[in-house]
Image (cartoon, helix red, strand yellow):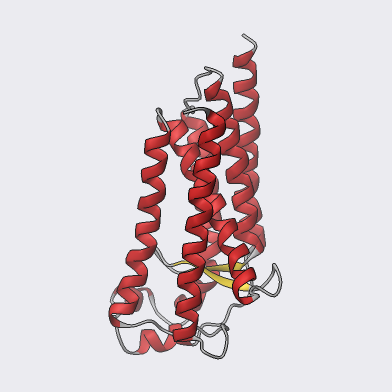
Amino acid sequence: MKLKNLFIWLSLFSIAMGFLESSVVVYLREILYPEGFSFPLAIMEGSLAVTEILREAATIIMLISVAVIAGKSLSVRFAWFIYCFAIWDISYYLFLKLLIGWPSSFFEWDILFLLPVTWTGPVISPLMVSVLMIILAVVIVNHSARGISTRLKPWEWLMLMGGAVVVILAFSWDFSAFIIDRYSPAGIWNMPVRGSVLEYARGYIPGQFNWWLFSAGNMLIIFAIIMLARRLHNLKHQ
């Protein structure tokens, strides 16, 4: 399939996933937040909680699956995965805005992910990451289509993955601090499934997003993208 057609079909797939995700959230908010979404969190228990976690895992499997089908090498598959992830994420917020008028601003807090711990942050933060993911994906895919080897060097993987880990730490920082403030290390390790922990989670209200940590992770990713783009550009002219 031609590169243009791949972009079109994978974009359509990701946009459709974004609508599917936003529609599920509309239903969940009707169930958990009938008066409108706000913190502190309403706790999902039992089969609803298990279903939500499995649903999030399933979305990642879906994105990996189409990336594997679309790409022929590890780097290109990685590129298609992050491209689809980014388009899906942007579409998700766009459809929520169209369907229920949320978020009211880019700086409104949201629950971003539940695995392996709860991620939270202002809506603008995952959108910023999505833009970087699209740029990185386009750099890899376009050079690969020109017959240039886009196999990433170990240090490029290290910088990209390191930046991603720092960004994830920023997303999980506030909620983790909330839990750590209430438990000793031993208490966290032996954290029960029910009872007081749910009460603590129910009381969580976002405090302050760690913009310094978030910016550091993004700068690392940006630097890796620039260095990768320069290396691939030089290969093109050899």
Tell me how many marks there are. Answer: 0
Above-or-below relation of 34 to 105 = below
Residue in view at x 55 percent, y 57 percent? 89
State the quadrant of the C terminus. Answer: top right
Position of residue 186 in the picture relative to residue 91 (left or right): left
> Is residue 162 in view from this perspective?
no
Above-or-below relation of 55 to 177 = above
- Residue closer to the observer: 151 or 95: 95
- Residue closer to the observer: 106 or 191: 106
Residue in view at x 41 percent, y 80 percent? 183
Q: Position of residue 184 (x, y in %)?
A: 39, 78
- Residue closer to the observer: 233 or 20: 20
Residue in view at x 66 percent, y 59 percent? 212
> Is residue 147 in view from this perspective?
yes
- Residue closer to the observer: 47 or 200: 47
Position of residue 191 in the picture relative to residue 238 (left or right): left
Residue sticking out furthest to the right? 105
Position of residue 65 in the picture relative to residue 141 (left or right): left
Above-or-below relation of 9 to 110 = above
Above-or-below relation of 213 to 224 = below
Q: Position of residue 67 (x, y in %)?
A: 42, 40
Q: Position of residue 143 (x, y in %)?
A: 57, 24
Residue in view at x 47 percent, y 64 percent? 21
Residue sticking out furthest to the top? 238
Q: Position of residue 185 (x, y in %)?
A: 37, 73
